[in-house]
Amino acid sequence: MSTGVLLRVLPPGLYAGRAHVLVERSLLVNRRLWLTVVSGFCEPLFYLFAVGIGIGTLVGNVAGPAGPVSFVQFLAPALLAASAMNGAVYDATFNVFFKFKYAKLYDAMLATPLGPVDVAVGEIAWALLRGGLYAAGFLTVMLGMGLISSAWAVLALPVALLVAFSFAAAGMACTTYMRSWQDFDLIQLVLLPMFLFSTTFFPLTVYPGAVRVVVRCLPLYHAIELMRNLCAGVVGLGLLGHVAYFVVMAGVGVVVSTRRLGVLLLR
């Protein structure tokens, strides 16, 4: 949707078409904190070397989308998806909560022509860029290690951006309901099991039938399926279902974030 259409559809005061200002501010602030930003890329990289290469030598081949692959080839696309998720979620939750509850940054922004929609879109866009940065770095490592076997993997980066955008939108929507730092334990309670059980380390076939249904509902599972199929060159119409999942997830997250910020900041 273009800026002009948004300006005509949304009520005055909610959107000024200046969401990019928040992205510029985040770039300026994090210019001196680049080590903190880059450090989020290290966790999946450590998993790749420790589990994929270390333990992977004891595991042998695992069933992949195009046939048996080494464990490190099976694991790497999953960690690529996790990189996009982590980079987006942590920025859209902890950082946004601090700015909202303690720094009162958004209250100051609303004294300018910016509106709640600008705040939501701008913060989600920055979280998207951070998640995309992690994914691009991890994809480069995969390429250097020879873990990519198809030219279709070039689409993994735009898919990672979609995944990051969806998780950022959902994360920010959840943050608007947080009351204190203790509530963020719930975020970890969701992220860690999802990381462990979304076929990151095991094929879906190892789970019982009822558990498979639950796993298929997890967003990270859909991200991993997209990454594995693209890296293996297995591309078909079935992947559109995974893409649609994230389009819906992103849309719901943006709508909820915008409405909640409108209620909390304009009351």
Image (cartoon, rainbow, N blue to C red):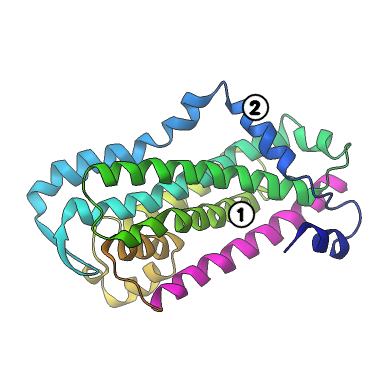
Q: Could you say which disc has been placed on residue 169 in the image?
A: 1
Residue placed at 11% from the left, 59% from the top?
Answer: 61
Judged from this view, the residue extending furthest toward the top is: 32
Depth check: 209 or 135 in front? Answer: 135
Where residue 147 sits: x, y (%)? Answer: 23, 51
Check whether the beta carbons of the residues at disc 1 and disc 2 lie within 8 A of each other. no
Task: Say which of marks 1 and 2 sits in front.
Answer: 2
Q: Could you say which disc has been placed on residue 182 in the image?
A: none
Residue placed at 62% from the left, 47% from the top?
Answer: 125
Q: Badge 2, how many Cα within 10 Å: few under 14, some, many 20+?
A: few
Whether residue 18 appears in magenta in the rendering, the answer is no
Whether residue 257 appears in magenta in the rendering, the answer is yes
Residue placed at 50% from the left, 53% from the top?
Answer: 161
Q: In which quarter of the image is the N terminus?
A: bottom right
Where residue 30 sits: x, y (%)? Answer: 58, 27
Q: How far apart are marks 1 and 2 (CA)?
A: 22 Å
Q: Badge 1, how many Cα within 10 Å: few under 14, some, many 20+?
A: many
The residue labelled by disc 2 is 28
Judged from this view, the residue extending furthest toward the front is: 151
Location of residue 201 by image quarter: bottom left
116 vs 35: above or below: below
Residue placed at 64% from the left, 64% from the top?
Answer: 251
Mark 1 or 2 closer to N-term? 2
The prevailing secondary structure element of the residues shown in magenta is helix
Q: In this view, does 187 lie to the left or right of 79?
A: right
Q: Can residue 198 be seen in this view?
A: no
Q: What residue type is labelled 1?
A: Ala
- Magenta part of the chain: 238-267
Please tell me whether mark 2 sits on a helix, a strand or a loop.
helix
Where residue 239 sits: x, y (%)? Answer: 41, 72
Please tell me whether mark 1 sits on a helix, a strand or a loop.
helix
Where residue 223 sits: x, y (%)? Answer: 41, 61
